């Protein structure tokens, strides 16, 4: 009986979330997915898959680095992203967020190899699930090199440790 109680205590402790999900000093690993299109004379549609890591420099404020790959068409696009994101606390398990980012992108394939720099913003909501979170939002990005603006949806999930 004693071993059962100790085991139950350990399981409950491991699954219990802190009041503040995004505490200073915490780290996060996440995946993201979405859709996008690229206009290179013809508009091409893509699926976006990525992974990112964040470090919380203050409660609810993270800086990170991520990489995403645009798949499903030619050329393939690869992006390296450096985001700063703030998650707003609420009395529920929902955390609205706002963020800014810098992105370096390059692609190759049947076209001339190209790269570009962009800056952008993102906003949405994330939902706390124990020590993890899922979220949806919208991203607006300004391509500095060619002067174009893009707006795309985003979906992501992550764990905090």
Image (tube, helix red, strand yellow):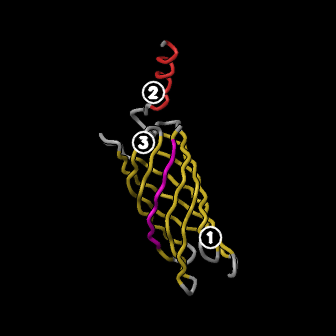
**Closest to the observer: 147 or 138?**
138
Mark 3 Cα-neighbour bin, 10 Å: few <14, some 14–19, many ≥20: some
37 vs 108, left or right, is left
**Closest to the observer: 95 or 4?**
4
Q: Are marks 2 and 1 in contact (CB under 8 Å)?
A: no
Give the CA separation, mark 3 to mark 1.
Answer: 32 Å
Disc on res. 77: 1
Q: Residue at x 49, y 29 (%)?
A: 14
Mark 3 or mark 2: which is in front? 2
Q: Which residue is mark 3?
A: 129
Does residue 156 sit above or below 12 in this rendering? below
Farthest-out residue, front: 1
Does residue 21 sit above or below 36 in this rendering? above
The spot of residue 107 in percent (x, y) is 65, 72
**Looking at the rendering, which quadrant does residue 153 occupy?**
bottom left
As helix, strand or loop, the secondary structure at mark 2 comes to helix
Mark 1 Cα-neighbour bin, 10 Å: few <14, some 14–19, many ≥20: many
User: Which badge, 3 or 2, comes first in the chain's sequence?
Assistant: 2
Which stretch is magenta?
150-159
Does residue 47 sit above or below 42 in this rendering? above
**Looking at the rendering, which quadrant does residue 76 occupy?**
bottom right
24 vs 53, left or right, is left
């Amino acid at each position: 009986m004693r071993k059962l109680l100790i085991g139950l205590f350990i399981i409950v402790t491991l699954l219990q979330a802190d009041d503040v999900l995004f505490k200073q000093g915490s780290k996060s690993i996440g995946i993201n997915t979405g859709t996008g299109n690229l206009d290179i004379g013809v508009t091409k549609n893509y699926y976006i898959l990525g992974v990112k890591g964040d470090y919380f420099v203050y409660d609810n404020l993270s800086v990170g680095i991520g990489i995403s790959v645009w798949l499903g068409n030619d050329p393939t696009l690869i992006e390296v992203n450096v985001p700063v994101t703030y998650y707003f606390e609420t009395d529920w398990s929902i955390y609205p967020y706002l963020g800014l980012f810098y992105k370096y992108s390059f692609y190759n394939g049947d076209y001339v190899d190209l790269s570009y720099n962009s800056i952008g913003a993102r906003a949405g909501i994330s939902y706390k699930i124990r020590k993890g979170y899922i979220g949806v939002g919208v991203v607006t990005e300004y391509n500095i090199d060619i002067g174009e603006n893009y707006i795309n949806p985003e979906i992501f999930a992550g764990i905090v440790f």
